[in-house]
Amino acid sequence: MGYYYIGQVCLNGHPITGNYDAYPEFRKNFCPDCGQPTITECPHCKSKIQGSYFSPGVISTKPFIPSAFCYNCGKAYPWTEEKLKAAKELIAEDESLSIQDKEILNQSLPDIISETPRTQLAAARFKKIASKALTITSEGLKQILIEIVSETTKKMLWG
């Protein structure tokens, strides 16, 4: 029977470790990519961040990709919260969108980043309004959200 390694991730979502627990010397207090502090547990419920799954006798070369949400409490990890905040700020900056369009985009974000019964509706609304946004806004939103949305939602939004 296998188990999950403990994942170490910086507050911006860069994975530090998660594919091996036997080498604590690979752990870092701060991210070498952005300088942010690193964590190994959910700030909300203190559960360990799940790294890659280890199964004895099976070799995996799949890289550790941090989850957007905690498996135990369901709350967004800090990097997910920051990406949502950045997306909302980017939407607010777009002068080509109406206040109503901005509100709809902001209301759609939670259903876009997690698969819910409303994800398809949210993606349709998002895609429709993002097409009216400035290119810098729509491309910026794609870059912010692409790492935290599911593969299904990526296909709905960006083909």
Image (cartoon, rainbow, N blue to C red):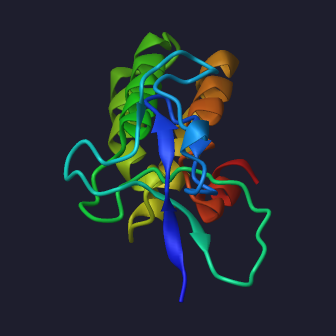
Q: In the picture, residue 78 is in which quadrant? A: top left
Q: Give the answer, above or below, for where 76 lies relative to 57.
A: above
Viewer can see residue 58: yes
Q: How many marks?
A: 0
Residue 74, horizontal then vertical, whole percent: 28, 60
Q: In the picture, residue 57 is in which quadrant? A: bottom right
Residue 120, horizontal then vertical, whole percent: 50, 63
Farthest left residue? 45
Residue 96, horizontal then vertical, whole percent: 53, 14
Q: Which residue is located at x 39 percent, y 67 percent?
A: 116
Q: Give the answer, above or below, for where 59 lies relative to 145.
A: below
Farthest bottom residue? 1
Residue 85, horizontal then vertical, whole percent: 37, 26
Q: Give whichever of 8, 23 is nearer the camera.
A: 23
Viewer can see residue 131: no
Q: Give whichever of 136, 9 is nearer the camera.
A: 9
Q: Which residue is located at x 57 percent, y 31 percent?
A: 144
Q: Quadrant of the C terminus?
A: bottom right
Q: Which residue is located at x 42 percent, y 37 percent?
A: 105
Q: Which residue is located at x 47 percent, y 19 percent?
A: 36
